[in-house]
Image (cartoon, rainbow, N blue to C red):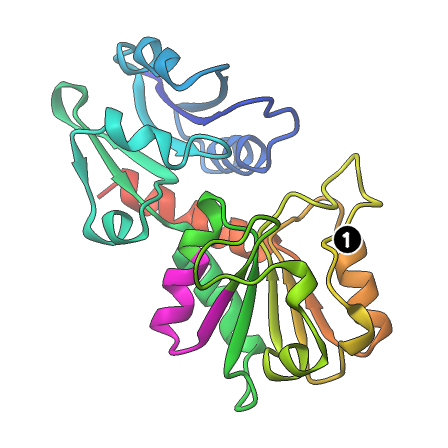
């Protein structure tokens, strides 16, 4: 029986996961296929769940939080994060949710850290940002969310001044701003206060270098895109499905 895995999302278009896993299956001679399940609303997941060939899903925007109510069980880390990006199909199509985003982010970030990295700004408050916050907690890095509509304990982009930028040397873009094809877009932070002590990490991987990254680079900052995080979280997903 051919096993089916897939990516659950909306308006998926180009997908890293489909390329990564299709290539893996081909290279390793595995009788598996990888499908993009592009659904307009989360309730359409019922058709996918009914398919007995489906063994596991990756979950992307905008369903990382919405999917939770359709699951039978939740890994404790995914529960704490409040977002799921991996679903394992067990016996009788029982679904268990996991989060491998935090693992991919943590492991890709570690080589970039130094003793000066004490505080981080997380740009954006969507599903991806929750895994980032969890990872920073594990790394004992203090963080603050930056949002266009800040909640209690969050900053607005207008709040970002020289003092804040100097104190927060790790800046992580969890917004979609700058993603292909709208590559000219970028988060509106005061780049004039970015220095060589900063690390600018963008969760976006297409394009390779976003405007956010190039603006940081101009100021001497270390910049990094989301590709390594994606590769690591995909490898972790495969591990989860096969354990």
Front residue of 2 and 216: 216
Q: In the image, residue 179 lies at what x, y percent?
A: 72, 41
The question of residue 134 being in magenta is answered with yes
Left or right: where 189 falls relative to 128: right
* Residue drawn at (41%, 54%) of the image: 131
Give the structural element (helix, strand or loop) at label 1. Answer: loop
Left or right: where 75 falls relative to 87: left
Q: Which residue is mark 1?
A: 210
Up-down: is 75 above or below 182?
A: below
* Quadrant of the image containing the C terminus: top left
Up-down: is 120 above or below 172?
A: below
Question: Range of the magenta residues?
Answer: 132-144
Q: In the image, residue 43 lies at what x, y percent?
A: 35, 14
- Outermost residue to the bottom: 115
* Residue drawn at (50%, 14%) of the image: 40
Left or right: where 7 falls relative to 202: left
* Quadrant of the image containing the N terminus: top left
Front residue of 194 and 161: 161
Q: In the image, residue 10 lies at what x, y percent?
A: 54, 23
The question of residue 56 being in magenta is answered with no
Front residue of 128 and 97: 128
Front residue of 142 and 1: 142
Up-down: is 107 above or below 123?
A: below
């Amino acid at each position: 029986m051919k096993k089916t895995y897939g990516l659950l999302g909306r308006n998926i278009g180009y997908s890293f996961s489909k390329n990564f896993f299709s290539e893996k299956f081909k290279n390793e001679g595995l009788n598996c296929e990888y499908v993009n399940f592009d659904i307009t609303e989360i309730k359409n997941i019922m058709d996918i769940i009914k398919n007995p060939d489906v063994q596991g899903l990756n979950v992307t925007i905008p369903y990382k939080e919405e999917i939770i109510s359709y699951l039978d069980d939740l890994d404790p880390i995914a529960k704490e994060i409040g977002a799921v990006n991996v679903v394992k199909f067990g016996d009788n199509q029982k679904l268990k949710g996991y989060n491998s985003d935090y693992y991919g982010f943590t492991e890709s970030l570690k080589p970039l850290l130094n003793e000066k990295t004490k505080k981080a700004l997380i740009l954006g408050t969507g599903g991806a940002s929750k895994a980032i916050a969890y990872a920073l907690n594990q790394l004992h890095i203090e963080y603050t969310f930056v949002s266009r509509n800040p909640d209690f304990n969050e900053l607005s982009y207008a709040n970002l001044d020289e003092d804040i930028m100097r104190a927060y040397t790790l800046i992580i873009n969890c917004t979609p701003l700058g993603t292909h094809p709208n590559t000219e877009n970028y988060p509106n932070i005061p780049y004039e206060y970015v220095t060589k002590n900063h690390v600018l990490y963008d969760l976006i991987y297409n394009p390779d270098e976003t405007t956010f990254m190039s603006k940081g680079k101009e100021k001497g900052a270390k910049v990094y895109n989301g590709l390594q995080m994606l590769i690591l979280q995909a490898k972790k997903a495969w591990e989860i499905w096969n354990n």
